[in-house]
Image (cartoon, helix red, strand yellow):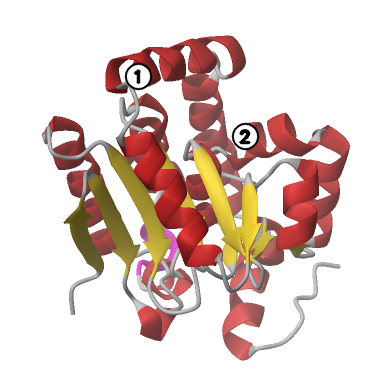
């Protein structure tokens, strides 16, 4: 099965995460496919805007924990981030063409960071966001520790990291996580927004994005590196082993 679907129409490239049997969770194959597609889209003069979405009714559950488990204790989470999510987050922020996250359903963990790194977010009314990492005793990564507090404030970001509670679409809109929310008109909102961006001044958009990055996210690279260091430590902890065991045994973890 192709883990990433793509279609190009009227200057808008739609990339759909496509692992429905795993709630569109990221494995290495899908992450690398997305990296390649974004690189090609940046070079392709026919592409003027990118939509990133999920197949079916789920955006993405984040990292596929099953893939991580098969490595046992031999994997460095820092090295994994440096190969996968860190360059992907930087690609999205440095891409000279607008990227719209069309959040068609649940979005969690690393996928939340990916959505936050996009330029705009349009959510279906059934969508919700979960920080996710604390459930398996990990620190936030994929830029979440920087991007989420920038949008909703430090207190709220820490609350939803600690609690692992969902942030539903309407609340996400009120707090500025998403730009628009749609129900029956969701797909039209996505298409109209992307179409307008595709007809806009490409070079000016690219320059504006660089300006926003410099003004608001000048420490993004440093924070991604810090997340990697913290995640490496957390990934070796007894709490993380308990969190992963509880996930697969479908029970609440015991962190006492």
Q: Main secondary structure of the magenta part?
A: helix
Label 1: which secondary element: helix
- Which residue range is magenta in the image? 71-75
Does 78 sit above or below residue 250?
Answer: above
Residue 239: which disc?
none
Task: Write down the residue under mark 1.
Answer: 206
Residue 69, given in percent of the width and then of the height, sits at 43, 71
Q: Is residue 168 visible?
A: no
Residue 220, given in percent of the width and then of the height, sits at 52, 23
Other-residue count near label 2 (Cα within 10 Å), few / some / many at <14 / 14–19 / ≥20: many
Q: Nearer the viewer, residue 243 or 147?
A: 147
User: Is 241 displayed left or right of 4 in the figure?
Assistant: right
Confirm or deny contact between disc 1 and disc 2 (CB under 8 A).
Answer: no
Task: Write down the residue under mark 2.
Answer: 147
Q: Is residue 234 visible?
A: yes
What's the residue at 21%, 48% (across, down)?
Answer: 10
Residue 215, given in percent of the width and then of the height, sits at 58, 10
Other-residue count near label 1 (Cα within 10 Å), few / some / many at <14 / 14–19 / ≥20: some
Does 122 sit above or below residue 168?
Answer: above
Q: Where is the C terminus found, in terms of image quarters?
A: bottom right
Query: Sequence order check: which comes first, mark 1 or mark 2?
Result: 2
Picture quadrant of residue 15: bottom left
User: Is residue 143 inside the magenta stretch?
Assistant: no
């Amino acid at each position: 099965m192709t883990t990433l679907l793509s279609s190009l129409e009227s200057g808008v490239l739609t990339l759909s995460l496509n692992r429905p049997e795993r709630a569109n969770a990221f494995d290495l194959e899908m992450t690398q496919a997305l990296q390649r597609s974004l690189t090609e889209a940046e070079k392709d003069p026919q592409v003027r805007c990118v939509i990133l979405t999920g197949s079916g009714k789920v955006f993405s559950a984040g990292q596929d924990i099953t893939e991580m488990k098969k490595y046992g204790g031999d994997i460095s989470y820092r090295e994994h981030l440096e190969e996968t999510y860190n360059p992907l987050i930087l690609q999205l922020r440095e891409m000279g063409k607008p990227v719209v996250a069309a959040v068609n359903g649940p979005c969690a963990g690393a996928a939340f960071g990916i959505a936050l790194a996009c330029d705009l977010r349009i959510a279906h009314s059934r969508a919700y966001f979960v920080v996710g990492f604390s459930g398996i005793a990990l620190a936030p990564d994929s830029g979440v520790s920087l991007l989420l507090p920038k949008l909703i404030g430090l207190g709220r970001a820490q609350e939803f990291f600690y609690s692992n509670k969902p942030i539903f679409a309407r609340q996400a809109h009120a707090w500025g996580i998403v730009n628009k929310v749609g129900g029956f008109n969701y797909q039209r909102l996505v298409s109209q927004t992307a179409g307008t961006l595709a007809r806009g001044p490409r070079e000016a958009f690219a320059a504006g994005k660089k300006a926003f990055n410099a003004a608001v996210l000048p420490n993004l690279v440093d924070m991604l590196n810090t997340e990697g260091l913290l995640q490496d430590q957390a990934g070796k902890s007894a709490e993380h082993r308990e969190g992963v065991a509880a996930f697969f045994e479908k029970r609440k973890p015991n962190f006492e």
